[in-house]
Image: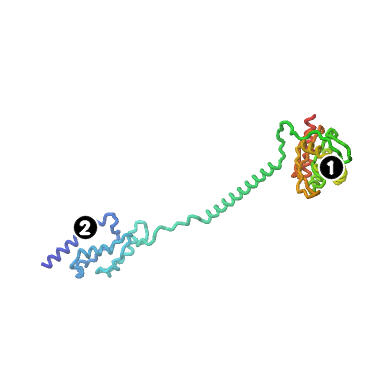
Amino acid sequence: MASSISRSLRLRSFYGFLTSQWRFSKPSFHSLPENSCTFPSNFFRDDRYGKYPAFAALNFKFLCTTATGNTINPSNSDAPGAGKSTSGSSDGNSGNSNDGKSSGGSQGKPVRGGPVSWMSFFLLLCTGAGLVYYYDREKERHIEGINSASNAVRQGPSVGKAAIGGPFNLIDHNGKAVTDKNFVGKWNLIYFGFTHCPDICPDELQKLATAIDKIKEKSGMEVVPVFISVDPERDTVEQVREYVKEFHPKLIGLTGSSEEIKRAARAYRVYYMKTEEEGSDYLVDHSIVMYLMDPNMQFVKFFGKNVDTDSLADGVVQEIKQHKVVKA
């Protein structure tokens, strides 16, 4: 009876093994590789699995199957007959590889080179250096363009004439009464200041005197330099006379009463005011401007403190030449 039961179990186990082999031969997640291990020939005759031959078959199949497709050598298993390893087990694995890869799947795809090679890195550096150089050049050109545009003298169209200038009645440094009519027929450069000025007025008058000589050299034209005081309380005729002698022999100094000085300053749009009054020692804040007047005593152009001697001389010569062309 026991032998018949054991025989029946062995037949069922063998039938289950055949059906499982057919089922696992289909491609699936649990399919065995082509070089999977097989049951040893004496598996069903081993007494250790005599009681549970079907369970032993499933257990052996689980040990021989891996999810990664690697083959477990039967020699490493505990199944009987494992000591008998086929001589072509390792060679068979390599022979069954479809892509020519070695058995076990330990070797993957060849590692590619890094994303940045030395050549690409060199090209990147060259491109960056070129962009930086181009940006610096364009920046320098832009700055040079701005500087040249700001320094260039632009002669724009003018509409009418500025309301600068007018009649005045003053006294020159020789004590002679003069008016604006005494200056008609000559080009004039007029500057408003005071003799007690510590630094600005001496610098401006020195620039005026030097420009007069340069104008004479460049154009042959004589321009009359005129100094009008805005400090009538201290700038007497004698004070003005001694003052103008220090700058140029042709410099004419004018002074007068407070009302006449105020009228002349208003006509030429000149600002002046006493500051830091301490007894008799005070300063006069005033406009720092030179006015170019044509032979008809009409305003032509003004020059500020930021104009140097050469620019002043060139500007006056240019205005004189343009005036001659227009008059002709």
Instruction: Please indicate, yes or no, whether residue 15 appears anywhere in the rendered image.
Output: yes
Side of 156 relative to 33 (left or right): right
Q: Quadrant of residue 24?
A: bottom left
- Of badges 2 and 1, nearer the viewer stands 1
Q: Quadrant of residue 87?
A: bottom left
Asked which secondary structure carries label 2, the reply is helix
The kind of residue on which mark 1 rests is Asp
Q: Quadrant of the C terminus?
A: top right
Q: Quadrant of residue 49?
A: bottom left
Q: Residues within 10 Å of mark 2 (few under 14, many from 20)?
A: few
Q: Name the residue nearer the viewer: 273 or 180.
A: 273
Q: Pointer 1: what residue?
A: 213
Q: Earlier in the sequence, mark 2 or mark 1?
A: 2
Q: Position of residue 323 (x, y in %)?
A: 78, 33
Q: Pointer 2: what residue?
A: 19
Q: Name the residue nearer the viewer: 285 or 127.
A: 285
Q: Position of residue 327 (x, y in %)?
A: 79, 30
43 is higher (above) or lower (below) than 109: below
**What separation in Å lies between label 2 and label 1 (alpha carbons)?**
125 Å
Q: Name the residue nearer the viewer: 279 or 104.
A: 279
Q: Residues within 10 Å of mark 1 (few under 14, many from 20)?
A: some
Q: Position of residue 238 (x, y in %)?
A: 88, 44
Instruction: Please indicate, yes or no, whether residue 220 appears anywhere in the rendered image.
Output: no
Side of 9 relative to 105 (left or right): left
Q: Quadrant of the N terminus?
A: bottom left
